[in-house]
Every structure is written in C-alpha cells, then in structure tokens.
Image (spheres, helix red, strand yellow):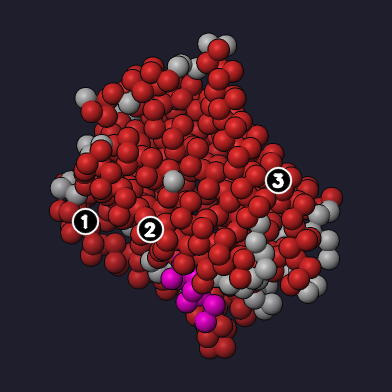
Amino acid sequence: MKLISRQMLSQITWVAGSYGASQGLRLFTNVILARLLAPQLFGVMLIINTLRTGIELLSDVGIGQNIVSNREGGKPDFFNTAWTIQIIRGILLFAIALLLAHPIAEFYDSKELIEIIPIISVVFLLTGIQSPSRFILQKRQAVKTIALFDIFIAAVSAVVHIALALYSPTIWALVAGLIIATSVSTTASFFLIDFRMHRVKISREHVRSIISFGKWVFASSVVFFLAMNFDRLYFAKEIPFAILGIYGIARTFSDMIGMLVQRVGNMMIFPKVAAFAKERSELRPAIAGLRLKALSITALGLSVVVALSDLVILILYDDRYIAAAFMLPILMAGAWFSILSTMGESFMLGIGKSVHSAQANMAKLLWLVTAVPLALTYSGFAAALCAIAVADLFRYVSLSFSQWKEGLSFLKQDFALLALFALLVMVWRFIFVQLGIVADFSTWLEYGSIING
C-alpha cells in the first residue's frame, strides 16, 4: 500500500485548509473579543475551559479512537455501543461538575466560578449525546466532509460569541457562546451520516473491546491533560487573572501549530499507518521521505512565524496585551518539539502502541511539575516561560526511545531538522530587524515589563 498518493495529498490539503480557515475564524473572534472584553475575563474563561477539558479527559476511554481503529468500528452495533457509553459518560460528567463547583471556586478564590461552573456543565450533556458520525467519517477517511463541518462550526461560534459580546461585554457572553456553539455542533453532527442509524444499544462484546483498548487511552488522556494544562492550572493560582488571560492568548497562538500537526496526525498518519498491510520492517522506509519533506517545509514556515510572532500581537491587540508579544516567540519556538512529538505519537498509535504516548506525556509532566514552580519562584515568569517552552523536548526524548525499540527511529533526521529550524529562526529574525519590521532584542524584552509591573 502506498503511503504517498494524490488522494493523500488532496486529503492533507483539506485537513490543513479547513484547519487554517477554522483557526482564522477563531483568531478573528479572539481579536474582536479582546477589544470588547477585559483581559481578566479571558483569565477566568481559561480556568473554566481548562477544567472542563480536564474533566472530559479524565474519563476518556477512547470512543473515537476505538471507532477508527477497530475493524468493527463502522458497523452500527459497535458505534451505537460506543455512543451509548458516551451518553452515560456525559451524564456522569455533568453530575461531577456540579459537585466540584464549590471546591474549585474556593481553591481559586473566585466567587464567579460558583455561578459559572454549574451552567457551563451543561456542555457535558451536549457533548455526551453528540453523534459519533465524525469518527465514522474519519474511519472512512471522508476528510472533505469533516473539513466543511469544522469550518461551519467555527463560523457559527464566531458569529455567536461576537454578537453576545456586543450585547453584553461580560463573562456571560463567553459562557453563553460556548453553550450555544456546542448545541449547534451537537445537532449538526447527526446530519453527517444517516441519523436513523443511531440507537441506544449495549453489546457486551463491544463494551469489552472498547474498555480493553481504552484503558491505555484513558491513562494517556489523564497524563496528556496534566502535561498540556499544568501551566494554566498552576499560573491560575500564582499570577493575577489579567496576566493569566494575556498568557492564554499567547498560548492560543502557539498551540495552533501543534494542533494542526496533531490534526494531520490523527486524520491522516494514524489511519494510514494503522492500515499499512506490509511487514513492519517496510514501514519506516515508506514514510521516511514524506516525513523529511513535510518537516522541512514545517521548519521553514514555523521559523518565519517565530521571527514575526511578536509583531502579530502588536498589530492585532491593544496595549493591554503587549506582554503577549514577549511571551509568544518563546512559546512558538518550543512548538517545534511539540511537532516532532505529535508526529511520533501518530506513528506509535498507528502500530497499536498507545502506552508510549502515556509514557511520553508523563516525562513532560514530570518536567513541568518540577521546573515551572522552581523557575517562577526563584527566577521569575520569564524563566517559567522558558521551562514551558522546552517541556515537549522531554516528551520527544521518551517517544524517540520508544520509536527506536520499534524500529521507527528518525534521530539523525531530527537532529538535522532541529539545526535547520534554529538557523532559519536566527536568519529570519536578523533580516526582519534590519528591515525594521520587528523590534530589536532590548525592545522585545521591554514587552514583558507588564508582567512585573
């Protein structure tokens, strides 16, 4: 089976194009909301979204991954069993969120959270009943349909959030916007496939299969959430909500790159590797060339983004958010290790080794839990920011060892690509400074002065 084909290139175009369109709409929404709302509101919402994601991931048994990877996943008995488990999980998460509202509000010393969390918990019910159609289409590699759906949802979310913020520039615009956008997404999901195929059903055989596969997905999801969100949860307790909101904006930009690669990995690499029909020994040669080309292009593009990232903040946001111009280049440079790690995870999942993902995220988490508090306490926020930026290096090291054991190592290729990326960043930054497009080093440092102000 060829891993490189015209069909695959077309699918990658749809994945990247829809992601670009969706993120463009989200960026436009974020910029408009930043002008309508105060920074501290983004800080509050950052906590809410982080906790919401955490509760979801801490109960994840890999419904989607089961449907995509299992040979029976496309059959009604299997995906309806998975959907029924998802519904039950949604109800349980709703109840858990209600119980945790008061303790969470007390921990973060925020009375707003006592009112907001019970309302936002409705999202768990909505995502619980959401159709598994997206995963079925992913299994069928119907990339175009998923892409158009994502753009539609992003457009609806943008219109709803901006309209609500214009009507009421308070935290409730963000809360109501999330609930309405999720409601539209859930409703529309039933029309991606024949909605008459949905049935509440439990097959014991399929439940056992889902739980067996999902135990490592669950372990990986728990560690993944903590590794991806420890900084947000920790900073929410240690820094003002206004600074947290500004940091959240910088993280949103830096995460876009990793999310794109993760999207390509989940929708393209994972299914392709999982369906590879030849001997394992033939897998690495089959993907090495495409991997090198893809990452070389990524290094070129990301280096330009890193070199210009502070300028993006200065153009799009007002002076209240200027500290993000200091934060973003650091975080964006660290996205390179996230890209390499995500690529490795997709390969390991494709060969059925989900345990390695959990191990890699644990390595990252251990670094964050140790380094970030020490850096913030003894050296300040800038040092903590650097510790966060290099965290995915530890994830990458763990995955590289796992890939080596499976005969899928790309260490030499990755060292060369890292050198290329670092060189390109320095060259681009030098050129842009000389042209007067971006500020020099001392001015860039001044952007972070608000953090200590």
The residue pinned by badge 3 equals: 294
Measuring from the top left, give residue 57's x and y in whole percent: 42, 63
**Whole-Å distance between the Cαs marked 2 and 1?**
22 Å
Horizontally, residue 420 falls left or right of residue 338, namely right
Identity of the residue drawn at 33% across and 20% down:
446
Horizontally, residue 439 falls left or right of residue 290, namely left
Identity of the residue drawn at 32% across and 42% down:
384
**Whole-Å distance between the Cαs marked 3 and 1?**
43 Å
Amino acid type of the residue that numbered disc 1 sits on in the rendered structure? Ile
Measuring from the top left, give residue 72's x and y in whole percent: 67, 78
**Whole-Å distance between the Cαs marked 3 and 2?**
28 Å
* Camera-nearest residue between 404 and 296: 404
Which residues lie in the magenta part? 212-220
Residue 365: mark: 2
- Residue 173: which quarter of the image? top left
Identity of the residue drawn at 57% across and 67% down:
402
Amino acid type of the residue that numbered disc 2 sits on in the rendered structure? Leu
The residue pinned by badge 1 equals: 104
Q: How dense is the environment of label 1, judged by Cα within 10 Å: few (below 14), some, or many (20 and up)? A: some
Q: Main secondary structure of the magenta part?
A: helix
